[in-house]
Image (cartoon, rainbow, N blue to C red):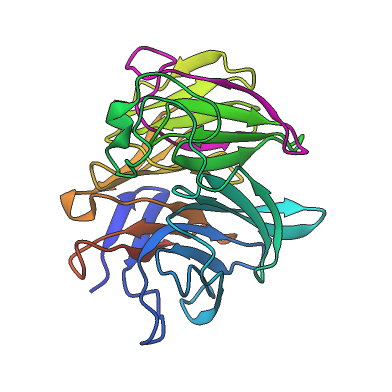
Amino acid sequence: MEAIVGSGKYTYRVREEWQQPPEWLDVKACAVSVDSQDRVYCFNRNDAHPVVIFDRDGKFLSSWGAGLFRFPHAIRIEQEGGQDVVWLCDEHHEQFYKFTTDGKLLQTIGEQGARSDTGVPDDDLSSSAYKKVTHGGGPFNLPTDIAFAPSGEMFMTDGYGNARVHKFSADAKYQFSWGEPGTAPGQFNLPHGIWVDRRGRLLVADRENDRVQVFDQSGKLLEVWPVELIGPAFFYVDKDDIVYIPEHNGGMVSILTLDGERLARWGGPIHRSCHGIWGDSRGDFYCVQPGEWTPRARRVVKYERQ
């Protein structure tokens, strides 16, 4: 029986069996995004099939990107000149990539394998490398996510081996960075996800500090959301300015306003390590999470608005 979660306006039917990959396709999802046609793109830690595309009913459509990635981390689909483009973050390659929706490489940012000086040993690619960051460095050291201002300017969180946000121009020229390791306001302890909201502010998921910090585009701290969050990982903000956050360390999903006021929350330890999240045009959303079916791997679960 499919569970019902959430509350009030934000009530959803959980479709754990939504994703229908072929038998030969091993899905180890880390991130998800949705294009303008409501096709769902899964960034997959599978070297042969790293980008996997499903229709909104979970039917497998295609895959691409074989052999291109080392450690997939984030995906987001943006509109550019009226066309969808796919942005991907490879944590261990230290790179961001822009592709067409059918897998043609358009742009690469970052030098493959080149890690900035942050005090983290070059041979440490672990998920706990952030504990060894002694000082902030330049782009990149195990980066995590990317977001875009309407101007085309880019902001990247650099989290597992760094403690910074980097700003790039619309033509991909490095501008400046901010952030240092720590727990004080404006400091970071694994900046993991980022979003530019309609107000032009940057929402940063400061994961291991269990908080969302809000900045202007020059890096000035505006506020820290007071709401309790257990390891916020990523953001999706819909057309009504509703914020969806997977809480990685608590296995929860939170739905909030742009002022950080909680509207709904559910989940628990069985979903700990939930990661990506994205919504479609109909008010449904998709979350990358583990569960009873396979505790050590994640798949994409669909939440249908009721």
Quarter containing the N terminus: bottom left
Position in image of residue 233 (x %, y %): 38, 41
Q: Nearer the viewer, residue 178 or 283?
A: 178
Give the magenta range. 169-197
Q: Is residue 173 magenta?
A: yes
Q: Residue at x 77, y 34 (%)?
A: 151
Lateral position of residue 291 relative to residue 145, left or right: left
Look at the magenta stretch and give its main secondary structure.
Answer: loop
Position in image of residue 264 (x %, y %): 34, 42
Q: Is residue 71 magenta?
A: no
Seen from this angle, which residue lies furthest right?
81
Q: Is residue 254 above or below residue 68?
A: above
Q: Nearer the viewer, residue 67 or 99?
A: 67
Q: Residue at x 36, y 87 (%)?
A: 23
Quarter containing the C terminus: bottom left
Q: Residue at x 39, y 65 (%)?
A: 300
Q: Is residue 10 above or below residue 164?
A: below
Which of the 4 quarters of the picture holds residue 163?
Answer: top left
Position in image of residue 20 (x %, y %): 40, 80
Q: Is residue 298 above or below residue 125?
A: below
Which of the 4 quarters of the picture holds residue 84?
Answer: bottom right
Seen from this angle, which residue lies furthest bottom?
23
Does residue 164 appear in the picture of this structure?
Answer: yes
